[in-house]
Image (cartoon, grey):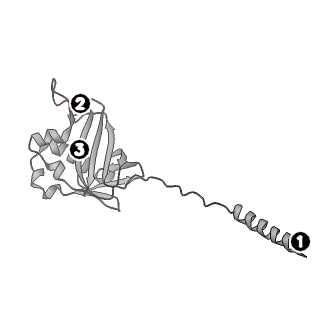
């Protein structure tokens, strides 16, 4: 009888070990990094050109537009708040900013990227900025974080309208 009890005890322990040892491990949690959405309020911190913009023949190339504008006393683009909505529209507060009055160098970027009646669509890594009535569009690549985002696009012309293929990068900080 004793050996019978030992056998049952041994089988019970063996069975318990097998059940515990064969327990399925939890599936690993796979996290994916999602590029942040444009939805929200943003302020421009940098606008860079590659190659650098040459304002006139023989001029030193300008790789970063914001310091160039600051040296001219123009703060329109850095004072500006760009608001992207969940419905796909985006606007600026340029009309209410005195700094955005008579500033032709700032207006080039302002009108090209952030004019009235603009809309946008986006995915995790790209966006398309549309002009009013979607007559033109600018496909951009998005990168960055929840608080700092860059939009990059290529144009066949530089800021002066010269036939120089240029990569533009607009960096914005969440406000």
Task: Indicate the quadrant containing the C terminus: top left, top right, bottom left or bottom right.
Answer: bottom left
Q: Which residue lies furthest to the right in this view?
A: 1
Q: Position of residue 27 (x, y in %)?
A: 60, 59
Which numbered marker is on residue 46? Answer: 3
Q: Distance between the residues labelled 3 and 1?
A: 83 Å
Q: Closest to the observer: 149 or 58?
A: 149
Circle 3 packing at 10 Å, graded few (<14), some (14-19), many (20+), is: some
Q: In this view, does 101 lie to the left or right of 162?
A: left
The reply to whether callout 2 and callout 1 are in contact (CB within 8 Å) is no
Query: Which residue does the image show at 27% across and 44% down from the upper left?
Result: 170
Q: In this view, does 75 lie to the left or right of 16?
A: left
Query: Which residue does the image show at 25% across and 39% down from the upper left?
Result: 48
The residue labelled by disc 2 is: 162
Q: Is residue 27 left or right of residue 153?
A: right
Q: Closest to the observer: 93 or 21?
A: 21
Q: How far apart are marks 3 and 2 (CA)?
A: 22 Å
Q: How far apart are marks 2 and 1 (CA)?
A: 98 Å
The residue labelled by disc 1 is: 3
* Vertical comparison of 59 with 116: above or below: above
- Type of secondary structure dominating the magenta stretch: loop
Q: Closest to the observer: 21 or 61?
A: 21
In magenta, the rendered stretch is 54-62
Q: Where is residue 74 in the image (x, y as percent from the top left)?
A: 11, 45
Q: Does the magenta stretch include residue 57?
A: yes
Report helix, strand or loop for mark 1: helix
Q: Position of residue 144 (x, y in %)?
A: 35, 48
Q: Position of residue 41 (x, y in %)?
A: 26, 58
* Vertical comparison of 66 with 131: above or below: above
């Amino acid at each position: 009888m004793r050996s019978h009890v030992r056998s049952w005890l041994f089988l019970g322990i063996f069975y318990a070990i097998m059940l515990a040892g064969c327990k399925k491990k939890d599936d690993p949690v796979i996290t994916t990094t999602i590029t942040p959405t444009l939805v929200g309020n943003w302020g421009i911190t940098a606008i860079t050109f590659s190659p650098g913009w040459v304002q006139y023949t023989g001029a030193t190339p300008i790789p970063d537009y914001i310091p160039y504008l600051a040296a001219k006393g123009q703060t329109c683009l850095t004072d500006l708040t760009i608001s992207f909505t969940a419905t796909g529209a985006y606007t600026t507060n340029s009309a209410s900013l005195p700094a955005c009055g008579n500033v032709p160098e700032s207006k080039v970027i302002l009108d090209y990227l952030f004019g009235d009646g603009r809309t946008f669509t986006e995915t995790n890594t790209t966006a398309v900025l549309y002009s009013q009535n979607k007559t033109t569009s600018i496909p951009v690549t998005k990168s960055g974080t929840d608080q700092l985002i860059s939009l990059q696009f290529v144009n066949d012309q530089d800021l002066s309208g010269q036939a120089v293929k240029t990569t533009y990068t607009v960096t914005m900080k969440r406000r």
